[in-house]
Amino acid sequence: MKRIVILGSTGSIGENTLKIVEALPGMFEVVGLAANTNEKRLLEQAKQFNVKATVLAGKDGQDALCELVSRPDIDIVVCAMVGMAALKPVLAAIEAGHDVAFATKEVLVAAGELVMRERAKAGVRLLPIDSEHSAIFQCLQDSRRLPWCVEKSGATPNAVETLTLTASGGPFEGRADVDFERVSVGEVLDHPRWKMGRKVTVDSATMMNKGLEILEARWMFNVPVGQIDVVVHPESVVHSMVTFVDGASVAQLSVPDMRFAIQYALTWPERVASGMPRLDLAQVGRLTFRAPDEGRFPCLRLAREAAVAGGTLPAVMNAADEVAVEAFLGGRLSFAGIWRTVGQVMAAHTVCACGDLETVVEADAWARRKAKGVIECNE
């Protein structure tokens, strides 16, 4: 039986993780739960799954989260928190020697070098929960491409040519008539395929989410950014693919349900029957793919620029995006203002090396102050 802690248990990833636990009785024991502010739901979950250790991050703070994930009676930590607030708990879990099932892409975006260095030092695994990275992970099982697989096997990871992340395109990608200065919060949050948290749903609509995933994949799979592509796939059935040096491509397909990726991370290296819905390709009818329009969705370009520059720029980009998305959701910034704000903050930043936690935290704080200033000047 695997003993798990769930950070962000009241969000969509956390709730679906608990559905997996419920669907596979006897396989998992939930020993800790943490939420940000939803105390009522956290207590309901704790009662249902008989969990004694709970943390309300908004009240108890980061130290309580770090203490929770450092407990010795843990096999795996599920990290489903939003944004950079997850960085210190993730590092604490790694330092404690625990594997981490990972959905918080911002941590690797902002501090990938640091996190992967600490992961290697501790000898633990990062298991992806995002559907795209889970798909790549599954496609790479036989290539032994992951750093920790290489460490254990001695294999040379030289077989991958390209990783291709698929994107739903969000609610606007296929609509040329949309005025991005005037779209409402409700329109942006009306995702055609996935039910997610508000922040990630906005990032999906701007395609910043895919930019963050490029940076995450760069660190998680040790592949240069220039070998990571994005294609728009509105049906969201092909979750990502890998092309190998011999020209063969391997893809992972399923119905769009985040429980597939969560379950595989929890049960890896095994596959377990749990009553998940089956894919009927005849019913789907056809699968379509097209290149993203980076002119209409500049966040992809901004993410690639941050990845090429490296250092503190990815952390700055991520922090500026978090502030801009919050301002948009609060009615203080237009949808297009999100990428304009991020671009202005990135342009104002002097990039420096990013090898320790203090540097990451400082870059993040600077970018948040700068983004708030940019938004206030434009109000």
Image (cartoon, rainbow, N blue to C red):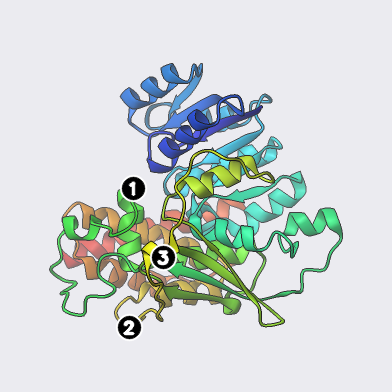
The answer to which of 301 and 44 lies nearer the viewer is 44
Q: Is residue 125 left or right of residue 231?
A: right
Mark nearer the N terminus (1 vs 3): 1
Q: Could you say which is closer to the camera, residue 109 or residue 98?
A: 98
For the C terminus, the quadrant is bottom left
Residue occupying the point 59% across, 62% down: 136
x%, y% of residue 370?
34, 62
Q: Foreground: 318 or 172? A: 172
Callout 1: SS: loop
Q: Nearer the viewer, residue 109 or 247?
A: 247
Residue under the point 75% across and 44% down: 122
Q: Which element type, helix, strand or loop, lies under badge 3?
A: helix
Tell me if residue 341 can be seen: yes
Of callouts 2 and 3, the N-terminal one: 3
Q: Determine contact: label 2, label 3, CB under 8 Å.
A: no
Mark carried by residue 106 = none
| Label of residue 197 in the image | 1
| Residue 346 vertical placement versus 54 (above, below) | below
Residue 2 image point, x, y percent: 65, 30
Q: Which residue is mark 2?
A: 295
Specify the farthest residue to the left.
Answer: 182
Q: Residues within 10 Å of mark 3 (few under 14, many from 20)?
A: few
- Residue beneath disc 3: 282
Residues at marks 1 and 3, CA–CA distance in whole angstroms: 31 Å
